[in-house]
Each structure stands twice: as structure tokens, then as C-alpha cells.
Image: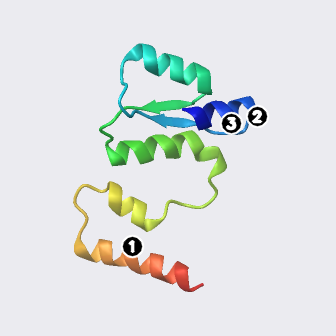
Amino acid sequence: MILAVALKEEGNGNAFIYMISGIFKDKAFIKEAMQKTGARLFFAKTLDLGEFIDTLSESLESLIEDPVAPIFEILTKPQATQREVRKAIESLEMVGRQ
């Protein structure tokens, strides 16, 4: 939380601050942490990866120009086939070669 407070104090109003719970999960702590840091969202553990990615994508949609990478689609798909996983990995390898 220290880093998030420092970002807020620096006056960077463009910073998108998201918090994920560590030890403390009570509502009073979450409210205080979000107020102190200016966090846009607070995620409580244990995270559902698909829901987490969807929420971030929606929140940042106006800033994202590129489509979602195939690997993220596979990570959020409940039952991806081996072929789909292989294609997603190959697409990452192709990006690395460019």
C-alpha cells in the first residue's frame, strides 16, 4: 500500500491503481485502503483468473488498442483443447522472433 500512496501523492492522476488483498480482508480495511491510495478496484484473494482478467480488461478497455493475446484467451477458457493451447504458445513464439 505504501507504493500506491506514494503514486497518489506524486499527483499522477493517470495512474490506474488496483489492489489485491494480502492478509487483511475486512470491509473497513478495504475502504480505508482504497481511500488512501485512490485505487480503482480491490480484489480479494482467492482470485478467479478469468474474472480477474475480464474485470481488468473492462476497466482498461479505453487504453487497450491491441486485441487480447491468444494465450490470455486460453488461460480463461475452462476447457481448452491441446490444439488451442499449442496455437496460443506458437503465437507467443512468433512474437518473440519479430
Q: Residue at x 22, y 60 (%)?
A: 79
Q: Position of residue 54 (x, y in %)?
A: 44, 45
Instruction: Name the kind of residue labelled 1 in the image.
Output: Ala
Left or right, residue 25 beside residue 80: right
- Circle 2/circle 3 CB separation < 8 Å: yes
Mark 3 is surrounded, within 10 Å at the Cα level, by few (under 14), some (14 to 19) or many (20 or more) other residues, namely: some
Q: Position of residue 41 (x, y in %)?
A: 51, 31
Q: Which residue is mark 2?
A: 10
Front-most of 34 and 61?
A: 34
For label 3, the SS is helix
Tag nearer the camera, 3 or 1: 3
Which quarter of the image is occupied by the C terminus? bottom right
Mark 1 is surrounded, within 10 Å at the Cα level, by few (under 14), some (14 to 19) or many (20 or more) other residues, namely: some
Instruction: Name the kind of residue labelled 3 in the image.
Output: Leu
Spatial CA distance of label 3 from label 1 is: 35 Å
* Applied colour scheme: rainbow
Left or right, residue 89 beside residue 10: left
Taking 71 as reference, is 43 above or below it? above
Front-most of 93 and 38?
A: 38
Q: Which residue is mark 3?
A: 7
The quadrant holding residue 36 is: top right
Q: Which residue is mark 1?
A: 88
The quadrant holding residue 95 is: bottom right
